Image (cartoon, helix red, strand yellow):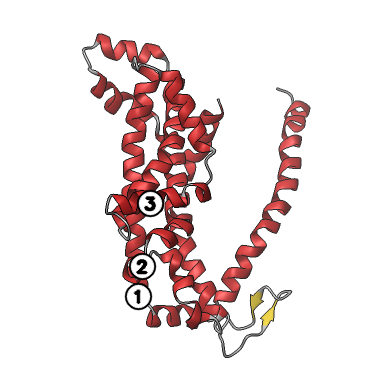
């Protein structure tokens, strides 16, 4: 490849970066504003840099939130909802995806079509039914009920994404494992599951965002204050923070931190997982 050819091949990437960097900067403005407002002390609400950043940053709002509210309890509730739902979706979804991808399952096409149909159901459209079902089975006002609901909502997406990843693995790999005497469980756990890490990363991000950030289902299905997750703290304490917007934005930042951390941990698998899903 000549020098001129290399320069021409790099030009589209440079133009793409020149477009995407300003777009990303614009998208980051609300994030910076939220963080800046959370660092604005109530005693000195002056701003700088076009009103985005506080003139004298302070962690006093975070200290106020920590002292006045059981943040650790609400954080623990969010973890008790998000972590089990992620584990259930990963384990059950990957096994179902392997069955649909490589095993002889009756009505496989019909099942896959039902999974796609389940993806288009809006959250607001199933709230009433979810509320009545949880009441009927005795899981209303229970973290276990929310875990089961989020797991059920996340399984269609997980099965579709992981199944696509499994189908990308050559069928000869499956045949070779069978020839070596491995059963279906060994093939799934020792061969297919490790190779699906990019797709699993996509599912983890999706499930964490849905179960951690959701506001509507916990609002409807939980009535006890001690069971409320972190996302309901701004609503539960709106009377306290109505005159303290800095504390309210501090809570919003605390809600966002775990999702950002999970994304940073799995981001190297994310692009490959999304590429495999598109294929």
* Relative depth, front residue between 109 and 99: 109
Instruction: Judge left or right: residue 108 versus residue 59.
Output: left
Between the C-alphas of marks 2 and 3, the distance is 25 Å
**Mark 1 and mark 2 residues within 8 Å of each other at the beta carbon:** yes
Q: Secondary structure at mark 1?
A: loop
Q: Secondary structure at mark 2?
A: helix
Between the C-alphas of marks 1 and 3, the distance is 30 Å
The quadrant holding residue 52 is bottom right
Q: Residue at x 55, y 31 (%)?
A: 275
* Relative depth, front residue between 21 and 205: 205
* Relative depth, front residue between 7 and 87: 87
- Marks 2 and 3: which is nearer the front? 3
Look at the picture and state if 37 lies above or below 126: below
Mark 1 neighbour class, 10 Å CA radius: few under 14, some 14 to 19, many 20 or more: few
The image's mark for residue 74 is 2
Between the C-alphas of marks 1 and 2, the distance is 7 Å
Q: Residue at x 39, y 47 (%)?
A: 150
Going from N to C along the chain, the mark reached first, 1 or 3, is: 1
The residue that label 1 is drawn on is: 70
The residue that label 3 is drawn on is: 132
């Amino acid at each position: 490849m000549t020098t001129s050819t290399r320069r021409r091949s790099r030009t589209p990437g440079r133009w793409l970066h020149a477009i995407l960097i300003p777009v990303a900067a614009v998208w980051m403005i609300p994030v910076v504003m939220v963080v800046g407002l959370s660092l604005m002390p109530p005693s000195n609400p002056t701003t700088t840099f076009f009103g985005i950043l506080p003139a004298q940053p302070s962690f006093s709002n975070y200290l106020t939130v920590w002292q006045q509210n059981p943040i650790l309890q609400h954080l623990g509730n969010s973890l008790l909802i998000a972590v089990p739902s992620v584990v259930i979706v990963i384990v059950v979804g990957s096994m179902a995806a392997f069955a649909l991808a490589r095993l002889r399952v009756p009505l496989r096409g019909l099942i896959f079509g039902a999974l796609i149909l389940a993806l288009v159901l809006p959250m607001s459209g199933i709230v009433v039914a979810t509320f009545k079902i949880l009441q009927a089975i005795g899981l209303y006002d229970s973290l276990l009920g929310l875990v089961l609901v989020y797991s059920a909502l996340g399984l269609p997406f997980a099965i579709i994404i992981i199944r696509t990843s499994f189908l990308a693995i050559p069928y000869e790999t499956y045949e070779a494992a069978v020839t070596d005497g491995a059963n279906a469980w060994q093939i799934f756990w020792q061969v297919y599951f490790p190779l699906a890490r990019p797709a699993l990363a996509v599912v983890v991000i999706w499930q964490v965002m849905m179960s951690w950030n959701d506001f509507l289902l916990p609002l409807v299905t939980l009535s006890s204050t001690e069971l409320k997750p972190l996302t309901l703290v701004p609503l539960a304490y709106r009377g306290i923070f109505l005159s303290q917007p800095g504390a309210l934005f501090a809570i919003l930042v605390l809600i966002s931190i775990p999702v950002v951390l999970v994304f940073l941990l799995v981001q190297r698998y994310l692009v490959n997982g999304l590429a495999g899903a598109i294929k």
